[in-house]
Image: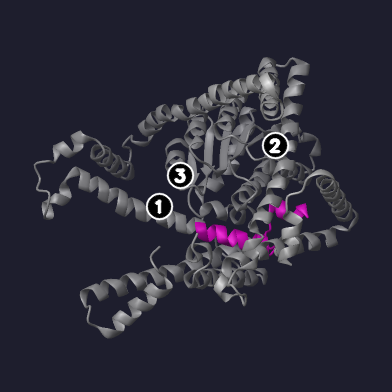
Amino acid sequence: MSEASQYASPAVWIVESLLAFFILWKILSARRGRELFIRRIPGLSALDEAVGRATEMGRPILFAPGLSGLDIVGLQSMAILSHVVRKAAKYGTRVIVPLADPVLYTVAEEVAKDAYNAEGVPEQFDAEDIRFLSDRQFAWASGVVGILHREQVASALYFGYYFAESLILAENGQMIGAIQVAGTPATTQIPFFLASCDYTIIGDEYYAASAYLSREPTLLGSLVGQDMGKLVIIGIIALGSIAFTANAIWPNVGWLCDLTNTIAKYFPRS
Amino acid sequence: MISFWHWISAPRHGWQLTAFIFGALAIGCGVLALLASTTPRYRKTLVAAVTFLAGLYYAIEFLIPPSLWPLDPPRNPFSEVQPLVGTLTQIIWSFALFLGVWNLFLIHGRAVAKRSRGWYNSAAFFISFFAIMGAGLLKDYAHGPVAKVSQSVFTILFSGFLTSLDATMFSLIAFYIVSAAYRAFRVKSLEAGLMMAAAGIIMLALVPVGAEITNWLPSTGFLSALRVERMGYWLLTSPNMAAQRAIAFGIAVGGLAMGLRIWLSLERGNFFDRQL
């Protein structure tokens, strides 16, 4: 592997520093008590509806974190699981969590236990509801499909990293008439979830989930910081596009050549 | 420092291996006991410090290229110990796998003991678990005809059963795509109509009959853009790619923000507040 691809380039330094600066700045200002607005995300608002439906029907909820391991995708999934379990614990509804990663399994067990304790109903925690099925993709998928059909779950929530198994799960959820909410950072699987689920959160909405659900100032600040960083990067992209287009139209303008050369030096095409 | 890491990660055999295993277990138990005996406040600080140091390793390893290190020949010393860090992560994963297997035994063991509905599936789990484990161990450690038979049994179980079952599950996707497409392509709104039209063009562009439909159009010039295969290619590489990149960009920024919060122990909300 070449040094250029293995280590951070100047462009990565610039972009990451900008993003980190905005995120930390906004976190600090939010902690000082500044009010921040966050738009409504229907897919996340639907989580309460999914819990309510399962409670009304007297059937369990399935929360599948996909093939996520103990990384940021998996940890975000656990933050959403914590919210769902707490909501479900209030109404005495079961939440079944099938896992494909043994490390995440141990974390999920603690998250569920913690959520039941926080709601004052530790006796509702059933260790058998947090299940490690298999670390093989399709073995795990067939296990989850089996749970969907055997338990006739009322709500199926898919939050985590998914590959080809996404459609198998979502279509089987459709078959049993479960309300389905999905969120994944896997861009290749988003279309499948969109086609089969009632609500799908896309893109960075997945990482906005913990801020949206907890309304914690630190997380809201981080979200606003992300958006500011994105605006700056969009500005860089727009500047680059305009400069290169103008340079193609007027190739003899000196300062345009200098500008495009500088941009090309720091942001080379991969 | 580097030679220490090389020394500690060098392959060992015999009494040295035994000593290392028991030594690591003793150190691990000691650290756990220390963590358990400290007050939650110090525990939180300790966990935050370890998290920060672990994150700092990866940050330095990635952000500082070898040319910026004052070493001859230029190299990033943090990159040199990365295989060791990878091995450490794998060891933790292996311990956790044991917990996962324990959970499987607990759930299926209870199902068999209680003869609950579908208990025979749980029994099948135990049979297949021990069969593949036994065959796998014997093929590697036994000698003579036992090893040969074990190899055959393992091949039948792994390639004959497991791989085939994986392929079966994967092939089901084809049928699910049809039912999902049927629902997605019902034209109920302008957006659904646009999606239907785009999908129709792309499907036609990918089959020979699609190219045949617009074959009468010139292959160069302005009108050539209306050929089905060109429109399909444009839809895939321009609007579709732009949307995919925009989503991926948002996800990357979101991931970076979450990584930063976890690294600096700034993550808050449901689980992270209480866990430490």
The percent coordinates of residue A187 (x first, y second) are: 46, 48
Which SS class for mark 3?
A: helix
C-alpha distance separating marks 2 and 3: 31 Å
- Which residue is painted at 21% across and 35% down in the image? B208
Magenta: main secondary structure equals helix
Residue where numbered disc 2 is placed: A91
Write down the region rendered in magenta: B252-276
Which amino acid, by three-letter code, is at mark 2? Tyr
Nearer to the camera, B156 or B3: B3
Q: Is A77 left or right of A234, judged from the image as shown?
A: right
The percent coordinates of residue A190 (x first, y second) are: 45, 44
- Which residue is painted at 52% across and 30% down in the image? A173
Give the colour scheme shown: one colour
Q: Residues within 10 Å of mark 3 (few under 14, many from 20)?
A: many
| Nearer to us: label 2 or label 3 | 3
- Please identify the residue farthest to the bottom as the structure is shown: A254
Residue where numbered disc 3 is placed: A190
